Amino acid sequence: MGFFSRFSRDMGIDLGTANTLVYVSGRGVVLQEPSVVAIDVSTRQPLAVGEGAKRMLGRTPGTVAAIRPLRDGVIADFETAEMMLKHFMRQVHGGKTLVSPRVVIGIPSGVTGVERRAIEDAARGAGAREVYLIYEPVAAALGAGLPVEEPTGNMIVDIGGGTTEVAVLSLQGSVLSESVRVAGDELTDSITQYMKKVHNLVIGERTAEEIKIRIGSAYPNDDYDAVTMDVRGLHMLSGLPRTVVIKAPEVRESMSEPLSVIVEALKRTLERMPPELAADIVDRGIMLAGGGALLKGIDTLISHETGIVVHIAADPLSCVVLGTGKALDNFKQLDRVFSSHAGGL
Ligand SMILES: Nc1ncnc2c1ncn2[C@@H]1O[C@H](COP(=O)(O)OP(=O)(O)OP(=O)(O)O)[C@@H](O)[C@H]1O
Ligand SMILES: [Mg+2]
């Protein structure tokens, strides 16, 4: 087998709490799907994976379960996670099963040994020949185009679905990092709780996420503070469906607690910083990645709280997978970015 064909099947994977993305050498990002699997409860067979399964969340009859196999950035349901990974890896290779590629996979920096093992095992179970792990903030920084191999401090904040990862990187490694299990999912949950408490309205996870994306914000702004949204749900007192009109500022207020947890994690990292690196960060600013970077006003909130310039990555949702791809394609030069590898070369 030739050099190119061997490498062309190799993959970089961002197995995220909310979304899974796959990069294939020479082809780029070939898959981006929600990390959701719908299974037949009696046979345990998958009925839909990805987008199709996400549409079923909260809408399944008793015979079908729509499952998000990852929570807080790590595998919560092993069997389903492996099933999902296998499905996506096959999809990428056009249904061929005889591939056992080298896989680079992102892991949150706060994972335990057991959680790390679970991710490796799932990738192997899904057909990976060699599994290399890379810390997600390192991958995110690579994918955002930060010069992580230089002796300069670079700060990356990846606000995903399950975890917020804050890291200061230099010379391919993480000098300081902080990982909190508060991110986009908690922002969504806060909206659900708020709707229940203040409007007596029960809404599903999908609706709450839609509110966050459409009218949610992290910092006041005249442009979007005037916006309202009609929200449909189940009224708790009458037990009947009802539409409630909500305003952008109340959505922001409902998310203030998880937002402050995220900002505090960032501040803690800044406070622990060695002075030379602190000077670099002041010069270069903070880079935001992950879906949470798309929340309106999050850059303004962070720069207001820290006094440091904040940049949003060009494609926040793809940073980690693009970084795993860069690590895969520059395997020798970027050898120190890997946190470990399972299986010999
Ligand atoms: N426009 C938007 N505004 C606000 N939040 C958004 C927007 N788009 C996506 N999100 C949120 O971003 C999160 C998903 O981001 P991302 O895909 O980076 O997470 P992930 O990598 O799957 O999770 P993790 O890294 O924690 O495992 C979700 O909580 C989603 O609601
Ligand atoms: Mg992520």
Image (cartoon, rainbow, N blue to C red):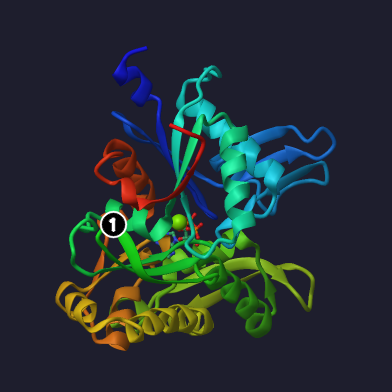
Ligand 2 closer than 8 Å to label 1 CB: no
Image quadrant in which the C terminus is located: top left
**Picture layout, residue 187 above or below residue 330:** below
Q: Which residue is mark 1?
A: 172
Task: State the residue in front, 299 or 26.
Answer: 26
Residue 75, given in percent of the width and then of the height, sits at: 63, 52
Left or right of residue 161, residue 200 in this image: right
Which residue is outermost to the front?
344
**Picture layout, residue 72 above or below residue 145:** below
User: Residue at 23% of width from left, 80% of height from top?
Assistant: 278
User: Residue at 35% of width from left, 64% of height from top?
Assistant: 174
Tally of numbered discs: 1
Left or right of residue 235, residue 18 in this image: left
User: Residue at 48% of width from left, 20% of height from top?
Assistant: 94
Label 1: state its secondary structure: loop
Q: Crowdedness of circle 1 by 10 Å Cα count: few (<14), some, many (20+)? A: many
Quarter where residue 198 is shown: bottom right
Quarter where residue 114 is shown: bottom right
Residue 269, given in percent of the width and then of the height, sits at: 37, 79
Residue 14, given in percent of the width and then of the height, sits at: 45, 47
Task: State the residue in front, 276 or 25.
Answer: 276
